[in-house]
Image (tube, coloured by chain):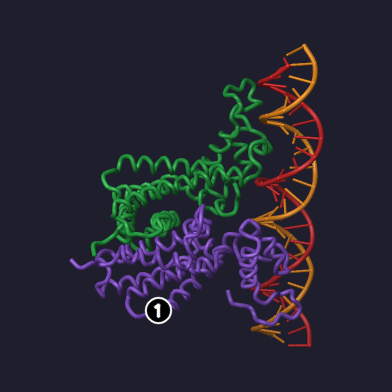
Chain colours: A green, B purple, C orange, D red
Amino acid sequence: MPRPRAAPKHAYHHGDLRAALIDAAVQILEKRGEEALTLRAVARHVGVSQAAPYHHFADKVAILAAVGEEGFLHLSAAMEDAKATAGRGPRDILRALGVAYVRFAVRHPSHFRVMFSGILASRDCGSLHVAAGRSFELLLGAVLAAQQAGVLIDGDPARLALYSWSMVHGLAMLHLNGVAEGPAGVLGTIDELAEGAAEAIGRGLEKRPV
Amino acid sequence: MPRPRAAPKHAYHHGDLRAALIDAAVQILEKRGEEALTLRAVARHVGVSQAAPYHHFADKVAILAAVGEEGFLHLSAAMEDAKATAGRGPRDILRALGVAYVRFAVRHPSHFRVMFSGILASRDCGSLHVAAGRSFELLLGAVLAAQQAGVLIDGDPARLALYSWSMVHGLAMLHLNGVAEGPAGVLGTIDELAEGAAEAIGRGLEKRPV
DNA sequence: GGGTAATCTTTACGCCGTTAAGACATGGGG
DNA sequence: CCCCATGTCTTAACGGCGTAAAGATTACCC
């Protein structure tokens, strides 16, 4: 499927309808929530007929998968940023990756929700899995480096990466569900909580002197 | 709202339609997935007209909230079970609670998904929040006991409880999204992973000798 | 310049959530 | 014993949704 050209004259051929549809979907998710995300609403938002999206996406789930893929790409970028700017030791990198993960979830809740709404599990959309795998490999690389530096316990690095991921993923999810504020009082900003969580899992997986 | 009697004669009055609807919703979720959960399908499954559910639930979200509440009640029961049977030290209790959490999520994925599908965040259904709060307080109590026993670091116990919760919640969520198996190879059974995760967060939050 | 392929529209079908109005059963007061 | 008030369920209907089929419109290639 070749991408169409960029300058539509008479607006019958849109130009880059596929990207516009994804953008519209994200905007609707952010402004009006998940239940307002309708294929027809997306089409209306772009100013196109209700059947037009079917020439670019197989069905509604496919457009959600595209949103999820975009999210994973952005997440990977954010993690690489964190990795680049954090930097001294492998423990700092791991901690920065964790904080960046939570921050991404909080700043892009619509993307994040879609990324883990079950599409990953049910659908066989390959590019989504590739994008998700890329994010995981970023974390895995940091874990491996930390292991080789001798600051993390031995064991399957994928397993340690999964534990680290679980920690920050759980915090992000609970925060998005309004749980992290707790019934009474405040536990701190989500950034503080993320730092604490990254610190805790770092301590949990660190190699200790005998 | 008084519960109706138990023995309907002519099946015009169902007897306990509310409970039957919740059961049917759970069964549909387990057998045919979330997208097959339709208010009309629930009504059909019970053998009742499509408008009947509206005499027991305000709308579709309300029946989902009821499923979520049921889930939190079952979760609390499972956690109390784990607490009762685990039991030597406060660390064992905490670890058992974490494992029980993951096991519950894996054994009752439909309930679990509904419990954290955003209803908790968006809706103001009180009884759901009460049930969720009860589960959290169970964990909070164990954290407090561990702190008083001197095996957990100092600090806001609610915050430590949130970290523990995040750890196992993240693992459960990632597993339900098919991530915990990883792209290549097997990291172990989910029970093993849960034990490892509980161990890791336990180490991360434990008080160490100076 | 004309045909072929890609892109978009119109129209339609069946299902969904939800509501309004009416039918049916049940239990308490004459 | 009967009757009616109340709670419970049904029928019928509306608009919106996902999706498919078929036709209209545009762009590209020879």
Q: Which residue matches tag 1? A: B86
Q: Residue A184 falls in which quadrant of the image?
A: bottom left
Residue A27 location (% of width, % of height):
51, 40
Name the chain under label 1.
Answer: B
Amino acid tagged 1: Ala
A43, B127: nearer the viewer: A43
Check the picture and name the quadrant holding the C terminus of chain A. Answer: bottom left
Q: Quadrant of residue D9?
A: bottom right
> Relative to residue B95, is residue A123 drawn left or right?
right
| Residue C21 rendering spot, x and y as whole percentages | 74, 60
Check disc 1: other Cα within 10 Å, few if <14, some if 14-19, many if 20+: some
Q: Residue at x 50, y 50 (%)?
A: A113
Residue drawn at x 36%, y 67% is B199
Q: Position of residue D25 (x, y in %)?
A: 72, 23
Secondary element under disc 1, as helix, strand or loop, is: helix
Relative height, residue C11 to residue B155 (above, below): above
Residue B24 x, y percent position in the rendering: 65, 68
Q: Nearer the viewer, residue A46 or B36?
A: B36
Residue that appears at 30% across and 73% down: B146
Residue at point 62% right, 65% down? Answer: B30
Whether residue A170 is visible to the viewer of this picture, yes or no, is: no
Instruction: Determine which quarter of the picture holds residue B79.
Output: bottom left
| Of B18 and B97, the residue lying toward us | B97
Question: On screen, A21 above or below A152?
Answer: above
